[in-house]
Image (cartoon, rainbow, N blue to C red):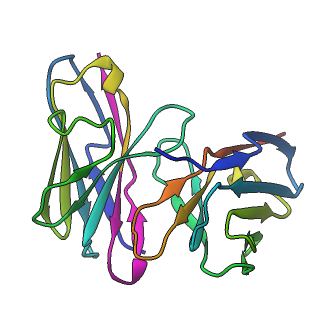
Amino acid sequence: GQQLNQSPQSMFIQEGEDVSMNCTSSSIFNTWLWYKQDPGEGPVLLIALYKAGELTSNGRLTAQFGITRKDSFLNISASIPSDVGIYFCAGQLFGNEKLTFGTGTRLTIIP
Amino acid sequence: GAVVSQHPSRVICKSGTSVKIECRSLDFQATTMFWYRQFPKKSLMLMATSNEGSKATYEQGVEKDKFLINHASLTLSTLTVTSAHPEDSSFYICRLAGANNEQFFGPGTRLTVL
C-alpha cells in the first residue's frame, strides 16, 4: 500500500537539542497525525492536525499542517531521554477511517 | 483515552499451527477495527478493515483465508493466523475507530513462528 515519505529516516542527537522531521505525500490529506512508538508497543497519538496551515503544540512538541495539504512537520524542542523512539506521521481523508502511514523517523539520543 | 488490550502480547508457535490474537476494548465501542502488521524497523502496513458483524475487507496482497478476522462485537476483534510460517513472524497491532473520528491503537502482539 501507499506510504508517506518521512525524513530523516533516523536521527542521532544529544539531549537538549531540538529535533525536526517532516512528512510528504504525492496526494493531499484532510488530517495529519503524528504518533510515537516505543519498542514493543503500539503507536501513541501525539498531535492531530485538521486544517491546512494549522500549527499545533503539545508541550515541547509542535506540528504543522502544510498549506498544500501534502506535507507536515513535527518539531521537538529541548529533547529528553524519553523522546527516544520511532515517530510516524499518518494522513487521513475525510469520511475515510483508513490511515496512510509514513516510513518513520527513529530518534536516538547520544549520551 | 480508551483502554485497549491485545492478547497474547507475545506468542511463539511452531510452523503449521494457528494462532489467535485478540484485540479488546474495555471502555470504547469501535465501529471499525483495523489490523496492521509491522516488520522490524518498518512502518505499519494495513492488513484489513472490519466492521462489527460484517466480513472484513482485506488489503491487496493479504490472504483472507490465511488471516481470519472476526469482529465479534463493538469491543472485540480477533485475528487468526492460520498455518503460520516463519515469514508470518511480525508485530501485529489493532486499531479501533469510533464515532467522532476517535481512534486508539492496541499495544501489539509479537508473533514468532519457529
Q: Residue at x 75, y 63 (%)?
A: A73
Q: Percent position (x, y) of residue B75?
A: 20, 68
In the image, is A60 to the left or to the right of A31? right
Q: Quadrant of residue A79?
A: bottom right
Residue A59 in percent (x, y) is at 73, 75
Q: Along the line of sight, which residue is nearer the eye, A59 or B72? A: B72
Residue B108 within the segment the image draws in magenta: yes
Q: What residue is shown at x 32% (from left), y 43% (from top)?
A: B9
Q: Is residue A86 visible?
A: no
Residues in magenta, as a range = B94-114
Farthest-out residue, front: A27
Residue closest to the eye, B13 or A26? A26
- Residue A110 in sight: yes
Residue at the (14%, 23%) spot, across then down: B17
Q: Judge whether B46 appears above or below B86 on screen.
A: below
Q: What's the residue at 70%, 55% (across, down)? A: A23
Above or below residue A74? Residue B1 is: below
